[in-house]
Each structure stands twice: as C-alpha cells, then as structure tokens.
Amino acid sequence: MYQPESYTVALAFMLLTMICWGSWANTMKLVKQFPFQLFYWDYVFGVVIGSLIWAFTLGSLMGGTSSFGADLRQADQSHVVYGLVAGAVFNVANLLLVAAIDIAGLAVAFPVGIGLALIVGSLLNYILSPRGNPWLLFGGIVVVLLAIVLDAVAYKLREPDKHGITRKGIGISVASGILMGLFYPFVVKASIGQHSLGPYAVAFVFSLGLAACSLFANYLLMQKPLAGGPPVRFADYFAAPTLWHFWGLLGGAIWCSGTVLNFVASRTNIVGPAVSYAIGQGATMVSAFWGVFVWKEFQGAPRKSKTALALMFLFFAFGLMAVACAPLFR
C-alpha cells in the first residue's frame, strides 16, 4: 500500500481532491437531457469501479500486511459498518444537495449546505483526531465560509429572480449540510483503532455503502422527485445513448479518485482528517472556476456579481493557505 510520508505529497493529494470534487459535476453538464436520478446510477457504478482500481493499484503496491486485500481481511465488523454508514450518509447528503439546488438555487443551497458541512465536518474531525494548529485551521475555515457566501451572492446577483427562497429549500439545504458534515467522521471511526480499515479499504467499503443506499434513496427520488415533476422511468435509462452512460461512469470515477486521495492524505502523520476534509471542500472554488472560465456562466452578468466572484476567489485562496499551513505550525 502506498502511503505518502512527506507533507508535500500529502498536500498535493489534498489539492487533487479539491480538483476532483470540484470537477466531476462537469460530466453532468455534458448530458443535460439525462435526468439526474438516471445519471446518478452510472455515477454510483463509477464510484465503485474507481475504488477497486485504486485498491488494486496503489492500494496493493508492494503487497504485505498493509495491502488492500490483507487490510480488508483483518478488519473487524464494527469498522466495516462505520465505512458502510459513511457511504450511506454521504449518498443521502449528496442527493439532498442536488434537490436543494433545484428548489432554492445555488444562492441558498451552497452557503447553507456546504457551509454547514464544512463547520460540522471539520469540528467533528478535529475532535476525533486533533492535529494541526487550531487557530490556522479554524481561522482558515471561517475565511473559506466567507468565500462560499460570496459565491452564493455572485449567483444571486446574476439571476436575482430565478429562484425564490422557500422554507422547503432551506430545510433540505440544512439537512444536506449536516449529513455532508457527518459522513467523514464515520470514515475516521472506520480508520482508527485495532483491526480498522486502511484508506483504500475504507474507500471501497464506503463505495459499497453508497451503492446500497442508492438502491433505496435514488429509486425513491425517481418516484417522487423533491423538486416536483413527474416520476422518472427506468426505461429512459436503458434508452439513453452509450455516451451518456460513459459520462456518468467517468463522473463517479473522478469523484472517487478525489475521495481516495483525501482518505490517504488524512492518514499522513501531521495532516489529520480535519485539515484534509477542509482543503477538499475548496472544491467550491474549483467548480466556480469551471463555471466562470469554461461554461461562461457569468457572461453578461452585472458588475456587482463579477466583483463578488473576484472576492470569492481571493478569500478562498487565503483561507486554503491558512488551512494548508495548519499542520506545519503545531
């Protein structure tokens, strides 16, 4: 099993996590005609396949007792259950976040959902494994939260009348944020103590939990979409072009790659899960970058919107720098 020893490599892994988590949704934009619930089945398959590819490559490097196979065999039931629960919790949070965006828009869903996830996840992760300078870590997190709010403001100013702020949208955003913040502590619990799971094994077990939960949660959303509208049919999934399925698989594999790298980086001696998770949540900045410079989402937007966007990138940069430096000043 490959495990980085230096902070430089671990930081590179965390930055790659940020890029992967912030980029996978581009594959959804390439199949706009494909309902999200149907796209999500391919996304889930991509996550499971991606976890196996990493498990049998870097996870099995040099063999030994720490390799993926040996690590999975020695794990006890309680640690495996934690990994499965982590995947299930993330799956529900992810589905709720997409529903919240549909109902209330990015201007509500992102600051409430991702902001809550960052606070809850980082705090619980630090309690479970207190590593890194807390002043730099949580000071950086506050700055990142301000950046998320600015991102939401930019979207709101771009299309002020597109979405109404509804009680339902806020409620779903809150639920998504809390669950998104809770999934990583379950990963931590699966990874500490005797007979625990290593990062590659926990990523595979996590993917199984995500897939098992999807059988119920995603099917339920097909029958009763939270954003309203008619039920989504399985027949449309099988009638979709092969290329659409490919993009879904690729999206899942990209997200999974970022997750595996994040789990691996969090096990580096001086990093810890709180820092690893917080840097990974910089994905919001990456997704905004794609929206601005590739998809031209802010072309023709008012000047105030573009100013808020520029400030968002600046705040993100400073916040992430502070979090990245936290392990170096213990």
Image (cartoon, rainbow, N blue to C red):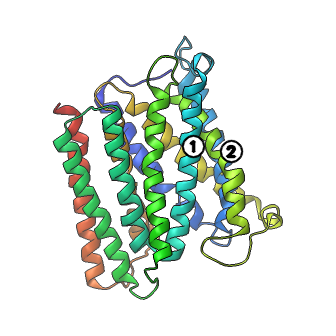
Dot 2 or dot 1: first in sequence order is 1
Residue 55 horizontal/vertical position (percent): 59, 29
* Res. 53 mark: none
**Residue 157, quarter of the rendered image:** bottom left
Position of 133 with respect to 35 (left or right) is left
Q: Amino acid at mark 1?
A: Gly
Residue 36 horizontal/vertical position (percent): 64, 65
Position of 54 with respect to 240 (left or right) is left
> Which residue shows up at 33% across the image and 32% down it?
272
The Cα–Cα distance between marks 2 and 1, rounded to whole angstroms, is 9 Å
| Residue 158 visible in the shown view | yes
Q: Amino acid at mark 2?
A: Ala
Q: Pointers 2 and 1 in contact (CB under 8 A)?
A: yes
User: From what the image shows, is residue 72 above or below residue 40?
Assistant: above
User: From what the image shows, is residue 75 above or below residue 105?
Assistant: above
User: From what the image shows, is residue 160 above or below residue 276?
Assistant: below
Residue 8 horizontal/vertical position (percent): 29, 32
Residue corresponding to mark 1: 87
**Residue 221, quarter of the rendered image:** bottom right
